[in-house]
Image: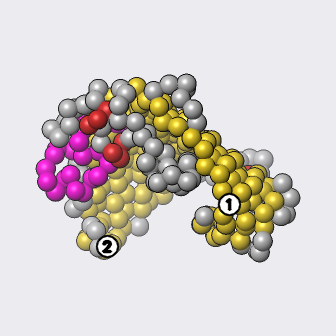
Amino acid sequence: VVGLGYDSVDSIKAIFNAKIIANKFGHIINNISSLSKNNSLFQLQYLIPDKLIKEARYMIQTSYLIDNAKNDKSFNIAISYSNKNDTSDVNFGLNAMHNQQKISGSKVISNMVYPFFSTARKYIIKWHNRDIKQNWTFSGLFAKKGISSNIDLIQAKTSYYSKVPINEEIRIVFSGQLGVNHTSDPSKQPSPTLLALGGNNGLRGYAFNSIINRVDQFQLLRAISFELQKKITENIYGTLFLDLGQVSKSFDEPWLRGVGVGAVYSTAIGDVN
């Protein structure tokens, strides 16, 4: 399939979609690509059927994205398994992003995450199991000095989330975060890259992302959260929660605490707290 598309960001976009290989064993290789003034995407999908389960298959997907507007390039590899006969969905993926944007007034506004570094690399590993509402993420960030910043940065962070039903009325939610950060000058580290807690980001009862450390070159983030949810109506749960967390230079500093009650409204795309 070859065609032209239009959207408010890229204006005119050329689209190419082709089934390159399809054999009698059910193996399929697809190509999905698009070209526009601002973005170019090249993507390959390799579909492998599960011989033991009908309507189940594995997918290996690679993609390469060039963002001309932000001068970013990213490469993605993802492996997933899907079974249309039930709700199980286990995904494992690896994402590597390389940023080499040149600093200018417009580019700083267009990319608020890493506008201060000449080079930034970010790696992400994600695992998700939809059947038991569980996911795990690991990310690593390596950044070098840029025109607007005179610091180097190395950061690693992992997070875990699990929602376990006890019965039809009660479910338990557990989440945790652990991160390390080393920078040559913490007072000048760009805010979007800081290890931070507060509000819905791991420590309720404190202002959003207000728990930070701009003093120590080496920083540790730790946070855990326990939540007991009781069904009130079909989509509304009452909740009792305990949050513990801290951003400090060592594990010796005491945990900060947030305790409270609230409500959760479940929707098809996620919970509203």
Identify the mark nearer the N-term, 1 or 2: 2
Give the SS element for disc 1: strand
- The residue stretch that appears in magenta: 100-123
- Look at the image and tell me in which quarter the N terminus lies: bottom left
Instruction: Give the image location of residue 148, x and y in percent.
Output: 17, 40
Q: Is 93 left, or right, of 64 in this rendering?
A: right
Identify the residue at horizontal 73%, vertical 67% (top origin): 237
User: Label 2 sits on what residue type?
Assistant: Asp
Quarter holding residue 212: top left
Q: Which residue is mark 2?
A: 7
- The Cα atoms of the two marked residues, 1 and 2, are separated by 43 Å
Of 218 and 19, the residue lying toward us: 218
Q: Give the percent coordinates (x, y) of residue 220.
A: 48, 30
Quarter residue 34 falls in: bottom left
Q: Nearer the viewer, mark 1 or mark 2?
A: 1
- Dot 1 amino acid type: Val
The residue drawn where x is 55% and y is 48% is: 203
Residue 51 image label: none
Which quadrant: the C terminus? bottom right
Label 2: which secondary element: strand
Residue under label 1 = 261
Number of labels in the image equals 2
Let me know if residue 5 appears in the view. Answer: yes
Tell me the crowding category of disc 2: few under 14, some 14 to 19, or many 20 or more residues within 10 angstroms, Cα based: few
From the viewer's perspective, is 166 left or right of 217?
right
- The answer to which image quadrant residue 205 occupies is bottom right
Q: Is residue 56 visible?
A: no
Rendered location of residue 130, percent (x, y) = 68, 54
Q: Nearer the viewer, residue 204 or 36?
A: 204
Q: Is residue 211 left or right of residue 216?
A: right
> Is 136 located above or below residue 156 in the figure?
below
Residue depicted at x 78% and y 67%? 231
